[in-house]
Every structure is written in C-alpha cells, then in structure tokens.
Amino acid sequence: PSPETYTSANLNLDSTPAFTDLSRWRLRVDQGAQTWHYLASDEECEEWPQKVFDKYHLGLPTDLPELGPVKTPLECANNGFEFYRHIQTDDGHWGGEYGGPMFLIPGLVIVYYITGTPIPEPMRLELIRYLLNRAHSKDGGWGIHIEGVSTVFGTALNYVALRILGLGPDHPAMVKARGTLHSLGGATGAPAWGKFWLAALGVYEWEGLNPVPPELWTLPKWLPLNPGNWWVHTRLVYLPMGYIYARRLSAPLTSFTQSLREELYVQPYASINWGQQRNNVAKVDLYTPHTKVMDVLNKIVTYYEKIPFSWNWFRQYAMEETIEQIKMEDENSFFLDIGPVNKVMNWLVVYYHYGKDSREFKLHVERNQDFMWMGPEGMMMNGTNGSQLWDAAFIAQACVEAQLADNDKYRENMIKTLEFIDLTQIKRDAPNMDRSYRQQSKGAWPFSTRDQGYTVSDCTAEGLKSAIALQQTPGLPQLISLDRMRDAVDVLLTMQNADEGFASYETIRGPSWLEKLNPAEVFNNIMTEYSYPECSTAVLMGLAAFRKIDPTYRRKEIDRTATSVLRYIKAQQRPDGSWYGSWAVCFTYAALFALQSLASIGEFYDNSEHARKGCDFLLSKQEADGGWGESYKSCEDRVYTHNAQSQVVNTAWAVMSLMEAKYPEEEPIRRGIQFIMQRQQPNGEWLQESIEGVFNKNCMISYPNYKFSFTIWALGKYARTYGDKALLV
Ligand code: LAN
C-alpha cells in the first residue's frame, strides 16, 4: 500500500498546528454507543446545540448554577446528583474519558497509516493535542499509563504516533521526546507489544521479536497451550498478532519510515543485531521478566520459525483457524471486539486478508469511532468502548441508597437509567459459542454495551443488583422480568471457580503454570483467569439480592455458592487484615467488597476476627484530614501506599467498608464523610483527582464517574446508618 495520505507535506510540521473549535464538538449516543462529531458549519451547530454533557466533557464552562450550601450528607448527595443528572446522556447512561493506558492511540494511528486510511482532520488535530498534553513536562516522554514515569513502550510508540499524525522530527516536542527515548536506550528496548507495532510499521525487524506462533490455536481444546484456555484478553490479542507475525507483514519502506528508523535508535539501523533484541527490555519497562522456561521455549520455536511460510503447511492450516476465530470475534461483537488492542489488530488483519474494499474493513473503520473520546486535553482512545453499564449500575444503586431514586424530581433520570440497564442486558449467547471459546452470555450484563456482548461476572451481578434496586423503588416501571433475572442468575451459576471465587469473564480454564509463559513483560497475571475478591463479592451480593425477590429459584445452588464464596473471601485476607484489589486502587477498593461479603452473613467488627482486622487495617491508613488517599503504587508494589493527597473515591470506599462492618465508633466515619462534603464544589460536582482504576497490576485506568457514584453512595449510607444530621457548619 502507499500511505499516500501521509505525505511529507503534512508529516513535517515544525510548529504545533492550530487545533479545533471546541464549541463544535457533539457527543452522539445510540443504545450506549458513544461517538463524537465535529460539526462543519454554524447552521449545523444551531440545529444541534451543545448540551451540558458535551460542555462538561470538553472542559467548557457548563454554567450550572451554584447550589445552596449543604449541612447534611443527604443535602450533599442531592446537590451532587443535581449536578450529575445534567451529564446523563439521552439514552440513560453516563459517559466519560475511560483513559489511562498510553499504548492504545499508537496502535490505532499505526494501522491508519499502514492501511492508508485518512484520519479525519479534527480527529488528527485533537489526537496531536492529547498526546502533547500527556507528555511529561519534565522529560517529554510517556509512560505505560498517564501517571507512570516515561518508558520505552510509552515514549517510542507515542513518538511514532505523533510523527504519523504530522509532527516533524524537529518539532520541539519531538526533539525532547527523542532525547528521552535515547537516554532510555532507544526503541530496541521496547517490550514485546511495542516491538510488534514497530515491526508492523516497518521500523523494527521481525527477527527481533520472540515468536508468536498461530499453531497453538490448532491444538486440542484440552491442552493448556490452546489459547482457548487463557485469559480472554490475552488470547484475543495473540490471535491477530499471530497472523501478522506469521506472515511478517510490515508496511513498505517509505522516506518517512526510513526517517523513523534513523530517529528511534541510538545506533544506525543497519548495524543493529536484531536477534539479540528479542529479550532486550529496558529496565523501566520491565515488570514481569520472562521465566527461564519461556526463554528456552522461545529459542526452540525460533528454529521452527526458519521454515518459510510457503513451505509450512501446518502454519497455513493454523492461519485458516486464526482467520476463522478473528471473523467470529468481529461478527459477534459487531466489529467492536473485546477491547481496543485486539480491535485495531483485527482491523489490520482484515486489511491484509480481505482488502480495503471489503465489508469487514469498512465496518472496522466505522467502529473505531466508538473508542474515541473527546476531552479537555484533546482526543484519546478509551480503554474499552466505554464503561456505560458499569457506571450506570453504580449510580443507580447510589441513588437508591441516598434516597434520590424515589424523589419525584429525579424520576425521569431513574427511568432512563433503568431503560439503559434493560436495553444493555445481553439477550443471546454468541453464535458458535463453543467454537469461539465463549462463555454463556444470554442474560448477562457486559461492562460497556450490549453490542460488545461479553459476559463479565461482576458486571452481570451489578446489572442485576441495580435492576432489582430500581424496580423495587416506588414509581419506577418493571422493565426487566423475573425470567430475565433468572437468566442472569443462570449465567452467574456457571462461573464459580474451583477455588470457590469468581473471575472476570470466564472460569479459570488453564493451570497456573501457564503464567510462566507470560510473554508480555509489562503485565502480570494475564495468562489465565484468576478469582478476585471484587468479582466474587459482586456475584455473592447479586445472588443474595435475587434470592430475596425469588426465594425458590435454584435456591440450593445459590445458598451453596454464597457459603463457598465466603470461604474464598476469608482465605484471601492478608495477615495484616487487608485484601488486595485488582481492578481499582487498591486495598481500599477490595476492603469494601470483602467487608460487604462478611456483612452479608452477619460477620461484623464485634463478632468477627476477619471484619475486625479489616477495619483496623483501614483505620491505620486514615489521613489527618479525615480522608483516605491511596496511590496507584499500591497496585504495582502490592503494599499499601499513601497518595500525596486524600481522594474522595478512596474515602468513600473506606467509610462504606467501615459502615458495612458496623464499626462501633462513628467518629472516623464522620470525619471521612465530612472530607467528602468539603471537597464538593458549589455547583455540586466533585473534581477529578488521582487515577482510580487498574488492570494487570501495572497499568492504570481512569473511572471518572466514581467520584460521583461512590461519594453519593457513601453519603446515603451514612444517612441511613447514623441519620441525616448536620455535619458541616
Ligand atoms: C476492565 C474494565 C472493567 C473490569 C471490572 C468490571 C471492573 C472488573 O471487576 C473485571 C475486569 C474488567 C471487565 C476489565 C478487564 C480488563 C480491561 C478490559 C479493563 C481493565 C478495561 C481495559 C482492560 C483491557 C485489557 C485493556 C486493553 C489492554 C490489554 C492488555 C489487552
């Protein structure tokens, strides 16, 4: 292909281009799908005026009024929702910048380049702005996530992205970033996924990569090495990666990529010994070093890789299976795919396999839009196609707890939320469910939208809990029938692991030694599913809520599951009383779930050693200002690490945990609640603080809606526990 769109004319800007007019951006929602549109003319802008939620997400003044001063927790919750309801979308959910990972935009932009697909001009400009804004002011580089120190992974890839987007090598930002990249040893030290993208672009040699053999897909299902037994995200990234690797597909060399070859390395490209770079990962990047076994296996497979593709019938057969699996993944998810990494890789495969005129290619281009989010700093790529269902389920439960859901004033908002939850329940199993290694999904709730369609254990549970909570609220309609709730329960009951806990998307399918073959270097615990206290608790609470409205359906199994989950939760507690959280930062998050589990069987501070130690651990972390602030470092290092400032989100989790456990003294809880109230702005909102979420131990991800849902929830819980008394003067 000739990437004619990216000519030297627009690839050599030495100064920063002018960006777009923020007053022209609009968010369109359609059954959860979020797409941002840049209107071309004043007339269009008049016809489609900017709404409060557009302005809010763009960082423009919303001009929402100052609300009266608050004294009590419920007044505070009221003001919070009075603000928050304005940013509910027309289809009933709440959007947000689901950012954090800094390795998503580069993959996307590289595939735009390789396939010669023009990036719409407003998107191009705003991507540049985002990446420039996210470069660390100190050294001009980027880390694996927005708050992380500069790494080769982040810096090499985002450097390349900005070059493709149009900045020239002499642009000051590029000079600075290149300096940092070189001081880290240059792009040869990129981790495996970085090496992959550079090789696909043609600025790194395939010989410098460890093998990604697609043959594994042809192994019998019962063999752990069959990727069908791996964690679903990992297998679905290795699927398209295997295709591109097996055919060693790189973009043709142009003067532009030639120039990149000169910019990215500390020595001349031709002089690099590529074979020696396979296991070269810069120190700052390396989080999970390869095991010896992995290195030995890689060496062996490297010999096999010497057989040319055209002679290797086994590989050709494996490629047919690979294409078949990719096709099923694309079709089953309406070309959204499970996440942004395999989404753009599948798009690249589709380009090589079916060509640019194919239906598949066009659909992929179209659905790229679902991942793009416009924020105050420019345009970025979300970590999934959104967090729609997840956020809607939490805010629904928070509103019920804070007595907002039965308030006439908010009835419309609550009906819309319930309609969204209703719409988003998955109504079918994936076609070819077994063939595509999919978990049962009829009745489940996904994390984002129904089209994406992946069962997640705790999303199903939160969907179910929020549906029950809303439908039990006077004045709200009954949209989700008991039969459909039973479907959700059926799904949940298929998902318990042998260790009695619940994992994320599926049960644990592979043995734990598979982790020894983790090739990714920058992530940990990614090869198989694992049970998590968070997911396990959500399921337990979901089943418990269901049991109350339908006391007979599969009652024995539900009871048995509930009892066994508790054994799992207790077993996970550390000697210091804490639980490690895997999906948000970190110990404060996990404590909430664990203590909720204990409370559900009547284990509280006063009568349970587990609950007591859990509370004492939290209390030992309370800050002088009454809040809790936990740093993302907790997740990386697996030890509680204080954040520079207290955070409303951590504080909400901590006080809710203490209230779950019926901690006997009110004072620490009251101080936490006061902290949350003091952080509220006069218009009712809370401002964004440090990053809230995490995955794979080492990569952080934002949950901007948590600062509304969990604050309101905690305030409501306080009022129910201690009464709605004046806490601020
Ligand atoms: C998510 C987001 C939601 C999260 C919870 C529901 C909170 C959790 O309890 C279960 C796991 C889940 C669904 C989850 C899994 C991993 C995801 C999809 C993410 C953290 C969002 C982004 C991440 C995905 C893997 C990012 C793409 C990067 C790769 C390494 C493929």
Image: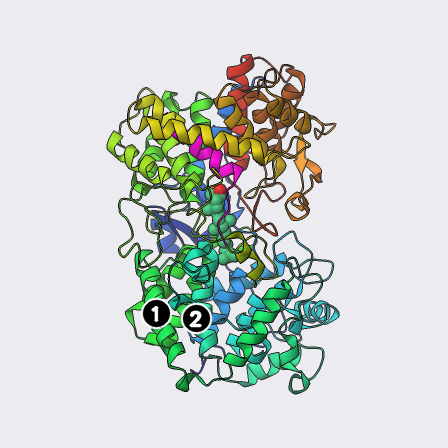
Which image quarter: residue 24?
bottom left
Q: Are discs 2 and 1 less than 8 Å apart at CB? A: yes
- Provide residue 112's location: percent of width, then percent of height: 45, 71
Q: Amino acid at mark 1?
A: Glu
The residues tagged by marks 2 and 1 sit, at their Cα atoms, a distance apart of 9 Å
Which stretch appears magenta? 528-543
Residue visible at 65% across and 74% down?
A: 188
The answer, for residue 304, to whether it is visible in the render is yes
The residue tagged 1 is 321
Q: Nearer the viewer, residue 483 or 124?
A: 483
- Position of residue 171 measured from the top left corner of the image (x, y, whole percent): 65, 72
Q: Position of residue 509 (x, y in %)?
A: 44, 51
Whether residue 151 is situated above or below residue 587 in the rendered picture: below
Say which mark, if any, is on residue 15. Answer: none
Query: Dividing the picture into quarters, in which one does residue 43 lie?
Result: bottom left
* Among the two numbered marks 2 and 1 on one chain, the one whose residue lies closer to the N terminus: 2
- The residue identified by callout 2 is 214
User: In the image, 496: left or right of 596?
Assistant: left
Few, some or many residues within 10 Å of mark 2 (<14, 14–19, 20+): many
Look at the picture and state if 61 lies above or below 198.
above
**Is 199 drawn above or below residue 552 in the view shown?**
below
